[in-house]
Image (cartoon, coloured by chain):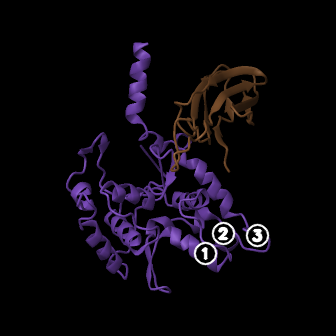
Amino acid sequence: MIRQAAMAVALLATWPAAAQTDDMANPAFLWVEEGKALWSERPRPGAKSCADCHGAAETAMRGVAARHPAFDAKRGRAMLLTQRLDACRVEHQGETPFEPESRRQLGLAAYIALQSRGLPVAIAADGPLAKTVAEGRALYTRRIGQLDLSCAQCHDDLVGRRLAATAIPSGHVNAYPVYRSDWLGMGSFWRRLGNCTTGVRAEAFAPHSPEHVALESYLAARGNDLPMQAPGFRN
Amino acid sequence: MTRVLIRVPKTVKPGQEFEIKVLISHPMETGYRRDHQGTPIPRDIVKQFRCTLDGEEVFRAEMFPAIAANPYFFFHAVAERGGTLRFEWSDERGTAWRESAALTVE
């Protein structure tokens, strides 16, 4: 009995970190399977699937998630990976954008991000994306909400300390979309951002809003050269 | 929607212990939560899980509301002969699911 308890504690101590390296123990892979099916699924008869234009995701999508957010010269603005998916759906598939945080959107994003796993994050932060990154940095250090806190006050100054029982992380975005056990599901960086903005009693930014894009661009650029971990598994 | 991920070794040696991993997609709603309107969310959990090798029981579990969403089973087995591993699980509403995987012993 005592031995079993000790084993359970030992398992808990390594979970979910251990699951991050065992795909079978990472529930995010239930979403990945969905994204994999979606990749070659035609939204309606006669319409193109992702695979019809791009071919095999393993080769065509390798490194794509590691480069996003990226500056889109045609549109003249920074684009997140999920905005890129929406653009493809609207322009090439004649569909409507994904519903934010839907199983299909997160599944496809997770499947595409998986093709970059282990590659270094490679945001071109000194090119035309620099303006968006700078905007993100300004937002990151701006005090907001009734608690009058900026992101930096926790995620720079108190990294590794605890907020109640939770360790304060340094705000890297190389594991999104992520399965979180407190959500019992998967979410994008936007969902996680909402946890913090409502936590400091500020109004949450809308998905794909300029604020969301700027903050994600800044955090991604800060994590340049870190290995891509998506789809992550966190508690 | 992806219902389950199953991992079983393709071939094992007779009498050699091997791993079986099953990750089930299910909300495991406890019945204790309320939605934004204050209405209770009805309980919806997988109650039974069973794994058999050619009809012989390998592993069985009964589940309760304290099990988190997307339950993950990881257990060991020993086989002398190959066969079909069947995985069956059911919820309290009478819905049952079934998957199988081939196991070769050599």
Left or right: residue A92 compared with residue B95: left
Q: Is residue A199 visible?
A: yes
Residue A20 lies, in percent from the top left, at: 46, 45
Residue ranking furthest to the left: A157
Query: Who's the residue at 68% across and 77% down the image?
Result: A94
- Residue corresponding to mark 1: A88
- What label does residue A50 carry, if any? 2
Q: Secondary structure at mark 2?
A: helix
Q: Nearer the viewer, mark 2 or mark 3?
A: 3
Given the image, on which type of amino acid does mark 2 rest? Answer: Cys
Real-space Cα distance between discs 1 and 2?
Answer: 8 Å
In this rendering, the answer to whether B93 lies above or below A202 is above
- Residue corresponding to mark 3: A44
Q: Are marks 3 and 1 on the same chain?
A: yes
Mark 1 and mark 2 in contact? Answer it, CB < 8 Å.
yes
Real-space Cα distance between discs 2 and 3?
Answer: 13 Å
| The chain coloured purple in the image | A
Q: Residues within 10 Å of mark 2 (few under 14, many from 20)?
A: many
Residue B18 versus residue A19: which sits nearer the camera? Answer: A19
Q: Residues within 10 Å of mark 3 (few under 14, many from 20)?
A: few
Real-space Cα distance between discs 3 and 1?
Answer: 15 Å
Query: Who's the residue at 33% across and 57% down the image?
Result: A171
Residue B24 lies, in percent from the top left, at: 62, 39
Residue B58 versus residue A160: which sits nearer the camera? Answer: A160
Q: Residues within 10 Å of mark 1 (few under 14, many from 20)?
A: some
Query: Who's the residue at 57% across and 48% down the image?
Result: A29
In this rendering, the answer to whether B78 lies above or below A190 is above
Given the image, on which type of amino acid does mark 3 rest? Answer: Arg
